Amino acid sequence: MEKSKKTNGVVSGIIANLVMVKADGPVSQNEICYINLAGVKLMAEVIKVIGNIAYVQVFESTRGLKVGDTVEFEGHMLEVTLGPGILSKNYDGLQHDLDKMEGTFLRRGEYTEAINSSDEWDFKPLAKVGDEVIAGSWLGEVKESWINHKIMVPFKMEGTYRVKWLAEAGSYAASETMAVLEDANGREYPVTMVQTYPVKLAIKAYTEKPRPFRLMETGIRIIDTLNPIVEGGTGFIPGPFGSGKTVLQHALSRQADADLIIIAACGERANEVVEIFYEFPHLDDPRTGRKLMERTTIIANTSNMPVAAREASVYTAMTIGEYYRSMGLKVLLLADSTSRWAQALREMSNRMEELPGPDAFPMDLPAIISNFYARAGYVKLNNDATGSITFIGTVSPAGGNLKEPVTESTKKVARCFYALSQQRADSKRYPAVDPIDSYSKYLEYDEVKDYLSSHVSDEWINKVEEARNLLMRGKEANEQINILGDDGVPVDYHIRFWRSEVIDFIILQQDAFDKIDSSTPMKRQQYMLDLVLNICNTPLEFDSFDEVNPFFKRVINTLKQMNYSEFESEAFNNFEKELIATLKERKAA
Amino acid sequence: METIAFKKIYTKLTQITKATCTLQASGIGYDEMAEVNGRLAQVVKINGDNITLQIFSGTEGIPTNAEVTFLGRPPMLKVGEDLAGRFFNAYGQPIDGGPEVEGEEREIGGPSVNPVRRLQPSDLIPTGIAGIDLNNTLVTGQKIPFFADPDQPFNQVMAMVALRAKADKIILGGMGLTNDDYLYYKNVFDNAGALDRIISFVNTTENPPVERLLVPDMALTAAEYFAYDKKETVLVLLTDMTLYADALSIVSNRMDQIPSKDSMPGSLYSDLAKIYEKAVQFPDGGSITIIAVTTLSGGDITHAIPDNTGYITEGQLFLRRDSDIGKVIIDPFRSLSRLKQLVIGKQTRADHPQVMNAAVRLYADAANAKTKLENGFDLTAYDERTMQFARNYSQSLLAIDVNIDTTQMLDTAWNLFARYFSKAEVGIKQEFVDLYWPEEKK
């Protein structure tokens, strides 16, 4: 596959970051090339070829580029470098280490190494000489922070090999040969700790992709209780601006029960990434006590960074996720926002003068999105260990209208739908996930039902259903009240509405900025749902409708204080006693 | 790049459209500036020897034998301390009759800041306006637009915020500013004795629209000089970004690009982001804060311009005329400052976040009550109280003529809570209620 001689070319045309290059040899689609601009090399990717003209998208500004400038083709697609040392790094969309770049401003053509090849790691062999191995087989492991980072047979290697030599336990540099593999013909292949892999191709080093079943706790009640996501599941969060997408994603990245978090900040605000840079090194992971940064890797292509690299950034993040999944880890991949990625596709499609699809997006947008989501999932590896990538993307629909191409294409593939509602955001009901429109397909999975029955409680699914019904009935009652007036409906309607408000205020709404309320463990969620359903099932008596509102306001207020208190603390228990006393006042005989 | 003694003059245009012209030339760099019969132009497309130039002031009267010279450089601005107090056009040329500015020439629209070299914004910008300080607190390094209909007094509010913000430099980027508004700003800053810290780049309605495209980059290049080189706090005012986006769509249309939503170019998001993301807090003290104006048509925020802006900026401020009190207020529902979480309750009193949310929630209840009333239903006692609260809240906190400090705002809110509601109805954390609930002052 490797070409013996590199293809060269010269620039023949420029429209913004689309550059036409006249090539003197073979060029492949998606091949990477470097354009020489007055001593600076600009990275670019081939996106179309007509005759001997390659159309390349440049990952940098093309200011000052001239016709006749020289181009070198690299003979491979856009690749990421995989190996120990990725964890906790801050990369740009093309996996250049942002911390290693000099100066305050980004400079064109400043490409830094993703992994320090001279870093030394303590290696422990897992395979033996003579073992038969295939791509993705674990040869050994090194300790990367707290992770047992597996050194694997490179994913690019096809077929079966035999381990001819394997390094002994000890300290080695990342670039040293750790093993020598031999194919059936006796050809030898040295393997180091570091390998490269093209981002646009999925890493398929697993035997099967079973249906996911294990709940992934996020500490967010409206997700865990009502619309749970599972390890290896997919979900998306569409919402107009200001509805709290980013706050929700940050909460997920802080609290989710995953081994690793990869955040692709794709075309979003730089200050949001900065928030992670500054907070995560200081915040503790409640489950392990380690700093959050120790499990987080950031791929930052903020909105002012080059557009073409934005498209690459989500693939870079996914490929790194697949790499860690192949080690048997559970990875949570967050992309904020997939709409910006789609817009990057649109900009290029437009410059190439392709016939546009809906809203000027490229025609194959649905296919691109569904291929990408399909790379997530729960997998059984070759050695029967399991790993997963849970993927949650945000979508920023134009004008907040969910009937637009990116939302619609995503809805077809993602299994969880967390619709953020402008109305709920306006009335500060955060997280503004719409309880009626949102859904989790996983609740229909028998595997998931079984898991919830045995790990949460037998009755759990029924209770969640009940809460959902109460919310629906409350909404209907409210509509009736609004049409017929407060005194035009039976008092019962008011009670029904206020019961749904109790669920809304206590289960659905959550204060992301409160230390205690921001993250609710499953046990506490179960306790609170039981308590709230208990209240909803308590028959109450009121003489007139205007007694209902103040009574439930008091109930909600007390429950809220419980949410703000340490679980089962004295304060928590006292508020609960107060609540029971309040309920007694109106309890029907 | 140094000046070349001999410049080649081209005199054969092969194509002329409303905004662009094409000629054959070689050795030309992308984005390079050129002069066509003395009019400034920029390279926007190169195809072999065919160079397409966008002429900023339009192609009216340009002949096919126009003299074209290439300047060998992208658009530049001379930066230096002397910029302070001066007025420039979109090309960075003085329009106040003063001398040329001496200083280093910098490319405009330069590279962006490495995200890992940014500091998290953390300094509150007090404005005295409770609708902003209490509900939508501004922070240095933030970018936030006013979403306003053309009839609303956004220029006045923006000038007021700029003067109270205590910035070292205020840079005004005026795009399609009417001459009257331009003079208004000039007067207000002059009267406040602030002219020596103001720098203006102005394209008025009298100038060609495509020229506007240079204004934000000019303003922000000057801002970067003061914020990064001089470590000053810089406030950039951009008005009106809708007219900037309109100019983008004119150019993309003339370049035969396929329009996306609302006839805007598909790259609108990136184009706007490049400008707004220049807002930054540098680690060594300097900062650029951007306050912009995006005018709406009929309050429609789903239009591509405000919509894309909302996804880029860190919140937005809405002005609304409250007919109950007859004043313009900062709309608490639709306004949002995303960075407020970084300062409220930290640099302000700890009860700030909860008081803010409770007040807005009660104000929302009042809005519901009002709808009920309009639909002809009876109001409950609670509804009546929320409506009274809303009127008072609007009058003493939301109106743009309020000028008090944050602690006073919080106390005012607590007093209003106590006057109209029970503690349970307000629903604030007990520890704050114990501290701040004014006792028995009904």
Image: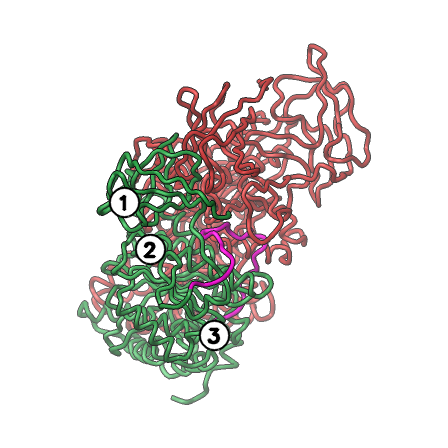
B199 w.r.t. A151: above or below: below
Q: Residue furthest left?
A: B376
The mark nearer the N terminus, 2 or 3, is 3
Image location (x, y in percent) of residue A369: 42, 35
- Quadrant occupied by the C terminus of chain A: bottom left
Report how many numbered discs are placed on residues in the image: 3
Whether residue B117 is in magenta: the answer is yes
Q: Which residue is mark 2?
A: B212
The mark nearer the N terminus, 3 or 1, is 1
- Front residue of B227 and A454: B227
Viewer-nearest of labels 2 and 3?
2
Indicate the amino acid at tag 1: Ala
Q: Which chain is red?
A: A
**Mark pair 2, 3: CA separation:** 28 Å
In this picture, residue B292 sits left or right of residue A136: left
A511 w.r.t. A356: above or below: below
Badge 3: few (under 14), some or many (20 or more) residues near its Cα, within 10 Å?
some
Question: Bounds of the magenta span?
Answer: B100-126
Badge 2: few (under 14), some or many (20 or more) residues near its Cα, within 10 Å?
many
Residue under the image location 28 percent in, 38 percent down:
B256
**Does label 2 lie on the same chain as label 1?**
yes
